[in-house]
Amino acid sequence: MIGLGDIRIVAIEQYGAGPFGSLHLAELGADVIKVEDARTGGDIGRHVPPFQSEDDSLFYQSFNRNKRSIALDLSVDGGRDVLHRLVSECDGVLHNLRGDVPEKLGLRYEDLAPYNERVVVCSLSGFGMTGPRREQPAYDYVVQGLAGWMELTGEPDGPPTKSGLSLVDYCGGLAAAMSLLAGIHVARRDGVGGDCDLSLFETAVAMLSYPATWHLTKGHETTRRTRSAHPSIVPFGAFPTADGWLMLACAKPKFFGRLTEAIGRGELAADPRFATLEARQRNNDELIPLLDAALRTRTTGEWVTRLNAAGVPCGPVNTLKEALKDPQTRHRELVVETPHPHWGTVRHVRTAGRGWWPLPAPRRAPELGEDRDDVLRDLVGLDDAQIAELARDGAFGTTQSTTPADAARDETA
């Protein structure tokens, strides 16, 4: 059996956070059945530009490899009936809908337990299914601002800045996948499932980590540091070289000593102003110009070679193109290819999940409703006549395409 091949997930998901979480489960071998809204052309991610065509996009392909798709209209009895049949044959349900929507659509554990008391229902909403913000929609960038991230990011004299990637979405998806697997473990052990109520907001606040501890315990206000510097460790940040930028991370005292020797300024390690972590932090404004002057004498590549040999944690500040061509990227086979009828060969970065067990080969993300008949025949046991009757009753919607504007519903996280 391939990895998580004994786990089946029904994913009522769209856009980034939910699909990113279930993508990790799918690439570790789980059978992820993606339930898309037949009324709106499916996952809104299908309509994200710039690389979009009809009901597909490269954005959608990035988040939905190795899944199966079925389009349902959950506002009609037939659509709900199909969903309940799927729930009866699955281990978990994952959805990233606004906090008040699961109750409206009957997607809480109490709604689904009659069809499978062992099912685990994982909700990844913007703010959770309880609390004063429960009914508010939320997206990654909004939550970054709300949770204090943007106040901590960027140059000291610049505007509040988001992270370069949608890290709240991605980390929320990973937290949901982890919670869902934990819930399935508990359900298999105890024989009863339940709700996992997660939110993007909680994910972002939890990731405040030690700056939050400093503030809550000592009232400390962490401020932005120039050039992506660490809030307490010096030197730790971006430094200019003769032809670009170098990231240094002297997180331990021994690394600073190695750095000063490698740049020909060994005396700095013995200087009382810089001899300890606390002293370097206090005298940061004196130390950094000295390091800058030394590091500007060679290229980034030369410094990386020299500092790696000295055992100093460092690396170039790569462009996206350079990162994807890095020898480590190639060696770890992080780029995978999937053939696609419209896009030709789509090249992706794989998820980070690993194990000693066999992993499934990468498959392109499914077309809208592509796996409907196979899922309903093989998993649920319906025959062609029953599927046709459900179609006539509107279970699968009246259309499987729409405009991006129509697809932009407010029921996501």
Image: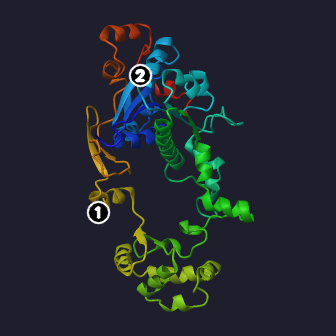
Residue at figure coordinates x 63%, y 39% from the top left: 127
Badge number at residue 71: 2
Of residue 181 and residue 62, the one placed in the foreground of this image is 181
Helix, strand or loop at mark 1: helix
In percent of width and height, residue 88 lies at 44, 23
Q: Which colour scheme appears in the figure? A: rainbow
Eyeballing the image, is 216 above or below 196?
below
Q: On the rendered image, what quadrant is the N terminus found in? A: top left
Q: Nearer the viewer, residue 210 or 160?
A: 210
Q: Position of residue 110 (x, y in %)?
A: 58, 25
**Is residue 158 visible from the viewing direction of this image?**
no
Dot 1 or dot 2: first in sequence order is: 2
Q: Nearer the viewer, mark 1 or mark 2?
A: 2
Q: Quadrant of residue 314?
A: bottom left
Residue contact between numbered discs 1 and 2, judged by CB atoms under 8 Å? no
Amino acid type at mark 1? Pro
Q: Quadrant of the C terminus?
A: top right
Q: Position of residue 348 (x, y in %)?
A: 33, 46
Residue under the image location 50 percent in, 19 percent down: 74
For badge 2, the amino acid type reads Ala
